[in-house]
Each structure stands twice: as structure tokens, then as C-alpha cells.
Image (spheres, rainbow, N blue to C red):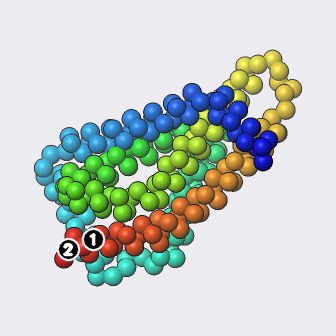
């Protein structure tokens, strides 16, 4: 266990710049998402809120999707996202796409929270806290770690390509890379359970309270 902690500490220290870059990229995405909300005109906001209000109304009538089905769909969505990052990390040309995916994830979070707050004030903030925050406390770090690992592995392949040490084995780094992604997938399963059962229930309670 001590050895694993040491390896993790060394890994973070050696690649702190990459993790920081990914975090900044994600935060920039959140800022851009909030800017997009503020740049929308009144008609666009009203149209989007109309569809949101329709969704709230249907949710008050009863569950739209069964929780088990939601769990399956949610887990598959996050699984596909992680697998995409994993595959992109195996190719040097996939590096820019990794950045785009992390940026877009931040943009979606920033836009969603920004729109709820813009249209519903503190009630929107409460709704966002109930429906978005719980699972994203796990999902966001997972995506940041997965994106960083993919970038690290991709850069390692790039260095190997331009290095004369072509005989350097790649199997061991790949095994570590794949193992870490398997662990992240396990954590994604926990986040999917939270999203399907905890966040969904909290969201329904907040909507019912708002429409009393």
C-alpha cells in the first residue's frame, strides 16, 4: 500500500502540469458555457425554458424512465465516454480531441447551471445542486483524470516515436494505463447509481416543491 501511495505521489508530481492544464481547460469550458447563456436573446431563453417547463410537467405526472433503465443508459454513456478517451490516448493524433472533449464537458456543465440560475434564480441554483452536483462530484474528477491519463500516454507515445530508444518496452506502461481506466470505470458505476437514484429523487423533490 505504501508503495502504491509513493507511485501515485510520484506520478502526480511528475505530471502536475498536465493535470493543471486539464483542470484549466475544463474551467474555461464552464466559463464559456456561462457566457453562452448570457449571450442568448430573450426569445431563445424563453423557447428553451418552455421545453424545460414541459419536462418538469411530465416529471410531476410520474417517472419518465424507469430507474433501472436510467442506470443502464447512464452507465453506458459514461462508459463510452471513458472508452473514447482511452482509445484517443492510444493515438497521437487523438490528443486535440481529448482537449475538445474535456472543454465540451465543462461547457455543458457551465451552460446548464448558468441557464437554471439565469431563468429561476436561487431556485435554479437549488435545482442544479440537486440534479447536477451529486454525480458530478465524482464524474468531473473521473473525466479530468481520464483525460489527463490519455494525454500522458499519448505524449509518451509521441516521445517514443521521436526517440532513438524504439526498443523501449511499451507493454508495462500500457498495462498500467488500461488498469487505471478499469478502476475509473468502476468509480463511474458508483456515480451512475448516484445519478439514477439519488440525483433523480432529489430533482423530483425540488420540482414538486417549486410547483406547489
Q: Spatial distance from mark 1 to mark 2, Cα to Cα?
A: 6 Å
Q: Is mark 1 on a helix, strand or loop?
A: helix
Examine the rendering and report whether any part of residue 96 can be seen.
no
Q: In this view, does 46 lie to the left or right of 182?
A: left
Q: Residue furthest front?
A: 2
Percent coordinates x, y for residue 64 in the rendering = 37, 77
Percent coordinates x, y for residue 110 in the rendering = 34, 46
Q: In this view, does 129 lie above or below 166?
A: below
The C terminus - image quarter: bottom left
Is 41 in front, or is 106? 106
Mark 1 residue crowding within 10 angstroms, few (<14) / some (14–19) / many (20+)? some
Q: How many labels does the image show?
A: 2
Q: Which residue is drawn at 28% across and 56% down?
A: 125
Q: Which residue is drawn at 64% across and 34% down?
A: 12
Q: In this view, does 66 lie above or below 18?
A: below
Mark 2 residue crowding within 10 angstroms, few (<14) / some (14–19) / many (20+)? few
Q: Is mark 2 on a helix, strand or loop?
A: loop
Numbered mark located on residue 109 in the image = none
Percent coordinates x, y for residue 43 in the rendering = 13, 52
Q: Residue at x 28, y 78 (%)?
A: 60
Q: Which residue lies furthest to the bottom in this view?
A: 61
The residue under label 1 is 207
Examine the rendering and report whether any part of residue 43 can be seen.
yes
Image quarter of residue 48: bottom left
User: Are the residues flagged by discs 1 and 2 in contact, CB closer than 8 Å?
Assistant: yes
Q: Is residue 179 left or right of residue 172?
A: left
Image quarter of residue 162: top right
Q: Is residue 98 above or below residue 132?
A: above
The residue under label 2 is 211
Amino acid at each position: 500500500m505504501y508503495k502504491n501511495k509513493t507511485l501515485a505521489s510520484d506520478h502526480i508530481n511528475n505530471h502536475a502540469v498536465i493535470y493543471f492544464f486539464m483542470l484549466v481547460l475544463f474551467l474555461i469550458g464552464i466559463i464559456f458555457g456561462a457566457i453562452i447563456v448570457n449571450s442568448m436573446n430573450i426569445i431563445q431563453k424563453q423557447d428553451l425554458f418552455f421545453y424545460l417547463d414541459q419536462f418538469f410537467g411530465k416529471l410531476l405526472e410520474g417517472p419518465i424512465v424507469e430507474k433501472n433503465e436510467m442506470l443502464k443508459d447512464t452507465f453506458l454513456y459514461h462508459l463510452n465516454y471513458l472508452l473514447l478517451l482511452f482509445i484517443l490516448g492510444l493515438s497521437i493524433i487523438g490528443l486535440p480531441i481529448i482537449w475538445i472533449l474535456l472543454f465540451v464537458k465543462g461547457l455543458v456543465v457551465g451552460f446548464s447551471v448558468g441557464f437554471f440560475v439565469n431563468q429561476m434564480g436561487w431556485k435554479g441554483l437549488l435545482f442544479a445542486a440537486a440534479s447536477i452536483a451529486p454525480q458530478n462530484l465524482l464524474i468531473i474528477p473521473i473525466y479530468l483524470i481520464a483525460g489527463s491519463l490519455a494525454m500522458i500516454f499519448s505524449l509518451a507515445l509521441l516521445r517514443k516515436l521521436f526517440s532513438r530508444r524504439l526498443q523501449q518496452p511499451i507493454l508495462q506502461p500500457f498495462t498500467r494505463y488500461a488498469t487505471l481506466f478499469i478502476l475509473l470505470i468502476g468509480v463511474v458505476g458508483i456515480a451512475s447509481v448516484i445519478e439514477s437514484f439519488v440525483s433523480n429523487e432529489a430533482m423530483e423533490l425540488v420540482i414538486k416543491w417549486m410547483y406547489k
